């Protein structure tokens, strides 16, 4: 019954009834989801092995990328299969512990991926905007603290959203309060705030990069201009020295 659960349910008036056979569209949907899961696992596993194998890649930036790859790997290895096995509709109408576990993993790992991207944007900000102090500021220890905080916050957000009744659950006296808190605090801290931070950071990086490019172009133009003037003077002197004998040969004073 749990295999392809969404495809076994059909909306009838205001309730769901069990169907005899799943639709072809559902099979296609889950096939694509399974294929996406395999691609996600293989791609992120390759990134993890590459960073772990090559010692020259053991840098704070790559450690953050490694942490992001682990989060995405778990999304493909855990969240996608659990989504196929325990779909949203089944968890909505057949609530049990496994559905809560699936939802917790789903929200925690997806939140972790977004927060990891936010940490990488902070790392890139210091690398581009403060290159002289970057190595002293973003160390391996700092990267480790960022990863620990990211995973901890993601776990708390995921568990908090599920316990708050964001996905499903019977309403109690505090149901409306829990739903409001989970609907507001969950998306804000799990998506909107990290996305806003990343947007601001990358906009700052863009403007700094533009300023650096303009400075480099002005410096190059100034250097080229000075070089061209020196080359012109040198060429004039050389040409003058080479043609001086000819000028003296054809000079009218030689006829005297």
Image (cartoon, rainbow, N blue to C red):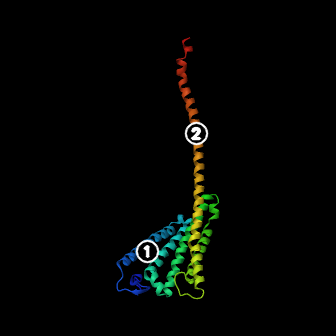
Q: Residue at 40% across / 87% down in the picture?
A: 17
Using the numbered discs, state the Cα–Cα distance from disc 1 to disc 2 in whole angstroms: 58 Å
Which residue is most to the top? Answer: 256
Q: Residue at 56% across / 37% down in the picture?
A: 228
Q: Is residue 84 visible?
A: yes
Q: Residue at 52% across / 76% down in the picture?
A: 109
- Nearest the eye: 49 or 110: 110
Q: Where does residue 223 sit, x and y in percent of width and height?
A: 59, 42
Mark 2 = which residue? Answer: 227
**Residue 235 lies in what quarter of the image?**
top right
Q: Is residue 59 visible?
A: no
176 vs 74, left or right, is right
Between disc 1 and disc 2, the foreground one is: 1
16 vs 194, left or right, is left
Q: Residue at 45% across / 79% down in the picture?
A: 83
- Nearest the eye: 185 or 219: 185
Q: Where does residue 150 sit, x and y in percent of width and height?
A: 59, 73
């Amino acid at each position: 019954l749990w295999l392809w659960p969404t495809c076994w349910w059909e909306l009838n008036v205001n309730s769901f009834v069990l169907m005899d056979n799943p639709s072809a569209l559902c099979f296609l949907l889950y096939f694509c989801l399974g294929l996406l899961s395999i691609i996600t696992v293989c791609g992120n596993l390759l990134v993890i092995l590459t960073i772990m194998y090559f010692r020259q890649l053991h840098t704070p930036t790559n450690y953050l990328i490694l942490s992001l790859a682990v989060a995405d790997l778990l999304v493909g290895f855990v969240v996608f299969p659990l989504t196929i096995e325990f779909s949203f509709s089944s968890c909505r109408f057949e609530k049990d512990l496994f559905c809560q576990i699936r939802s917790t993993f789903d929200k925690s790992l997806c939140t972790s991926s977004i927060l990891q991207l936010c940490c990488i944007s902070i790392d890139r900000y210091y690398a581009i905007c403060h290159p002289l102090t970057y190595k002293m500021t973003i160390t391996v220890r700092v990267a480790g603290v960022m990863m620990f905080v990211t995973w901890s916050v993601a776990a708390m957000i995921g568990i908090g959203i599920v316990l708050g009744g964001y996905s499903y659950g019977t309403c109690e006296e505090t149901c409306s309060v829990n739903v409001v808190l989970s609907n507001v605090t969950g998306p804000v801290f799990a998506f909107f705030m990290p996305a806003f931070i990343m947007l601001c950071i990358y906009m700052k990086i863009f403007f700094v990069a533009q300023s650096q490019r303009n400075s480099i172009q002005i410096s190059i133009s100034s250097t080229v201009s000075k070089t061209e003037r020196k080359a012109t003077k040198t060429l004039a002197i050389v040409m003058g020295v080479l043609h001086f004998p000819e000028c003296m040969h054809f000079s009218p004073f030689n006829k005297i």
